[in-house]
Image (cartoon, grey):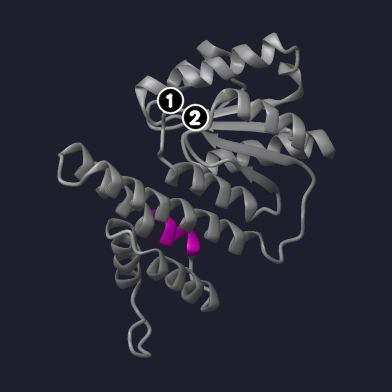
Amino acid sequence: MNGGRVASKPELYKIARDAVVYANEEQAFNLINEVAAQGGDLLALLKEGFGKGHQEVGDMFEKGDISLPELLFSTDVTRKAVEMIENHAEAGLKKAEGKVLLATVSGDVHNIGKGLVAYTIITHGIEVIDLGCDVPVEYIIAKAEENRVDIIGTSALLTSTLREQKKLEDELRKAGIRSKYLTMVGGATCTQRWASRIGADVYCEDAVEAAKAVIAHLSKKYG
């Protein structure tokens, strides 16, 4: 993408950022493939490139600098970039036992944080079922049951959507299946106090902590 010259990390991050800000899906896909082919750090690209672009678009929308359709176009590019990076991480890895389901709760379209968690878990060979963002509790539970997962992780970045994490705990108990799953919660507005209050098993501050919790649980369960 630079006339044969190997781009520096800051340049790659800017290309990723611009792909999101200007909703350029082709540019995002070409960049991911190029970095993957060179054995580059896709996790850093996701966090420092696509993630920063996603955050910038959100700030622009809040300030009224872009319209809702523009926000949605950029969010869709982010979502597809996350999925593509997850697929690259998963390719060729030896599978470990256990399944993890991840979702950003209903009413919340933030995807990067959960994408980082998914990527980190996948790199340990653990299967991840990523439902994306704005996912209703009922659908989360249905997919968890359908896929017989071990762990359900949800992300909520808005104060107004925290209640969806509580709703998940409540609905699992009502259905009599709460004990089947380890539940993890995270997100910018989520705290250990909140996790304890709603009865979630694990609070994860970041992707590394989430991966550690997943590995510890599955290692104990499957030996």
In the displayed structure image, the side of residue 219 where residue 205 appears, left or right: left
Spatial separation of the CA atoms under disc 1 and disc 2: 12 Å
Question: In the displayed structure, would residue 107 be above or below residue 30?
Answer: above
Q: Residue at x 33, y 65 (%)?
A: 13
The secondary structure that dominates the magenta segment is helix
Question: In the displayed structure, would residue 100 be above or below residue 36?
Answer: above
Question: In the displayed structure, would residue 111 be above or below residue 146?
Answer: below
Q: Nearer the viewer, residue 174 or 40?
A: 174
User: Could you say where residue 157 lies in the image, as x and y percent from the top left?
Assistant: 39, 31
Please tell me whether residue 65 belongs to the stretch shown in magenta: no
User: Could you say where residue 115 lies in the image, as x and y percent from the top left?
Assistant: 50, 47
Q: Residues within 10 Å of mark 2 (few under 14, many from 20)?
A: many
User: Could you say where residue 72 lies in the image, as x and y percent from the top left?
Assistant: 35, 46
Please tell me whether residue 43 belongs to the stretch shown in magenta: yes
Inspect the image, locate mark 2, and give the three-letter code of the amino acid beneath it.
Answer: Val
Residue 3 quadrant: bottom left
Q: State the residue position of label 1.
A: 190
Q: Which mark is residue 105?
A: 2
Number of numbered discs = 2
Q: Residue furthest right?
A: 223
User: Could you say where residue 195 lies in the image, as x and y percent from the top left?
Assistant: 52, 19
Question: In the displayed structure, would residue 80 be above or below residue 212?
Answer: below
Where the N terminus falls, by quadrant? bottom left
In the displayed structure image, the side of residue 95 where residue 8 appears, left or right: left
Task: Please tell me which of labels 1 and 2 falls first in the chain.
Answer: 2
Q: Residue at x 78, y 34 (%)?
A: 148
Where the C terminus falls, by quadrant? top right
Q: Nearer the viewer, residue 132 or 125?
A: 132
In the displayed structure image, the side of residue 39 where residue 18 appears, left or right: left
Magenta segment = 42-47
User: SS of the residue at dot 1?
Assistant: loop
